[in-house]
Image (cartoon, rainbow, N blue to C red):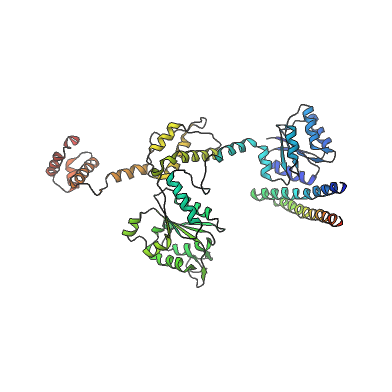
Amino acid sequence: MANNDKINKLIHDARAPLNRISMNAELIKLVLENDMPKDKALVALDQIINSCQQCSDSLQTISDLDSVK
Amino acid sequence: MLNILLVDDDSEFSDVVCHIVEFLGHNINTAANLAEAQEWFVNNTFDHVFLDFMLPDGSGLHLVEHLQSIGKTPKITLISGHPSVKGKLAEMCAPNVGHLVKPLQREDIERVLSPKKNTEKKKTTPTINKHFGTLIGESPIMQQLYTMIERVANTNANVMLMGESGAGKEVVAQAIHNASKCEGPLVATNCGALSKELIGSELFGHEKGAFTGAIARKEGVFEQATIGTLFLDEVTEMPIDMQPNLLRVLETKKVTRVGGNKELPVDCRVISATNRSLTDLAQNNIIREDIYFRLAVFPIDIPSLRDRKEDIELLAKAFLEQLNDENDTDFKWQASQLKELESYEWPGNVRELRHAIHRAFIMSDPKGKVITLPENLESPFSRVNKQTQANQVSAGQTIEEVEKELIHATLDKVQGNKTLAAQMLGISTKTLYNRLNAYGGIGEYN
């Protein structure tokens, strides 16, 4: 049961960066569609890159946990 | 403009959502947990709350309960990473609470912030069935057309569409393309609109420097339509001396760009269209016979609108729905107006019907709900066509009848001036009087 909770928590942690990626991508679309200053888009792109790494780390933790089990 | 509160413990996510919501023209504040959110509500009112389901100090549902207890009922959208939350929401039976599943998209946010426009759109779109995503009509003649489209879509045969101007040849081409589920695009070109000099380059492409002005290499439409469909509209208007080149491509399934020497494979279905009749094509040497057989492996006749009058109501409703959607209006047809539309001949077919409805839509009172049809549906073109048709000679008429018609048409043209009419007809005034006497029409022009 405790293990199940832990997995749920890890899945939640993996979803959070995905969510940020999606929203940042939408923001970049807005910037490009409306000729807004590109620095906003660059910040959003950096955040996407960071979030990808976080998501990958979370998935690795889940995978490690699964192999231990 | 709405006042919005976003409750989420992910500050980076909150920052980005703030940018997007502000861009959409709303005010937004953020809270990182339940306590902060409750604090916001002490001195402020919000129209909409975006609420994360899992917060550090409890569930988002606690805030929903709290707001209900203090009598505040903003619209709430719970954001969660799991669809099972939907069940919990249903148990709450709260009409002001909605739900979105992460990851969010901009359209999700836009939709929940302006639900009215969307529900209206949903209400209007599904009422009329569009066959193959494009064609409207349930008449028996259209059902036959749908069967033909279905059959031919499963093959790679070239199709020639024949039908009057405005009957919807390009729409049928789109329907065949959709039904064939090919991966490539539908590329359309109008052979009648291209000059003799440019038609080769348009169809087959050209290499850089092939002729003056060819500053870069260009793909022809045959190349552009690879693994898709090429629609050659008004194919019979193509200059006859260009036709051998087209025939060669159709036969060899290979194309050479103008100024090039490399043969490129052609892999597309060719749908061609003409508004000329088969007899016209055969008698007047408009298209070479060999090209006709290559293009019209499967000829399809598109019915004119007067041959499927029962579809006029459906078409009128569909066109009005589309105009309503585009302009955010709510015009409706009255039964008598639909009858009036059905009683007209529509020589310009669906195109003329669409144009007439658009004209009526613009003329209608924007505050009203009923569309105003013009007193006369005839377009200037249909009036001229009618006149020329009336003056046309057809087999079975007697020489006397034709002569009488000609004399009357000439007198009408010169406002009854007999001397002038006789001159135009190349007869003496006396002969004209004699003829009018014989036909019993002299009284009309005295």
> Of residues B187 and B365, which is closer to you in this image?
B187
Tell me: residue B296, above or below residue B3: below
- The answer to whether B205 appears left or right of B115 in the picture is left
- The answer to whether B266 appears left or right of B86 in the picture is left
Asked where in the image residue B31 lies, by quadrant, the reply is top right
Residue A66 visible somewhere in the drawing: yes
Residue beneath the point at 83% across and 55% down: A66
> Of residues A56 and B386, which is closer to you in this image?
A56
Percent of width and height locating residue B91: 74, 34
Image quadrant where one finds the N terminus of chain B:
top right
> Of residues B100 and A30, which is closer to you in this image?
B100
- The answer to whether B267 appears left or right of B353 in the picture is right
Tell me: residue B309, above or below residue B183: above
Residue B373 visible somewhere in the drawing: no
Image quadrant where one finds the C terminus of chain B:
top left
- The answer to whether A17 appears left or right of B366 in the picture is right
Percent of width and height locating residue A44: 74, 51
Percent of width and height locating residue A55: 79, 53
> Of residues B78 and B419, which is closer to you in this image?
B78
Residue beneath the point at 64% across and 49% down: A33
Disc tally is 0
Outermost residue, bottom side: B261
Percent of width and height locating residue A48: 75, 53
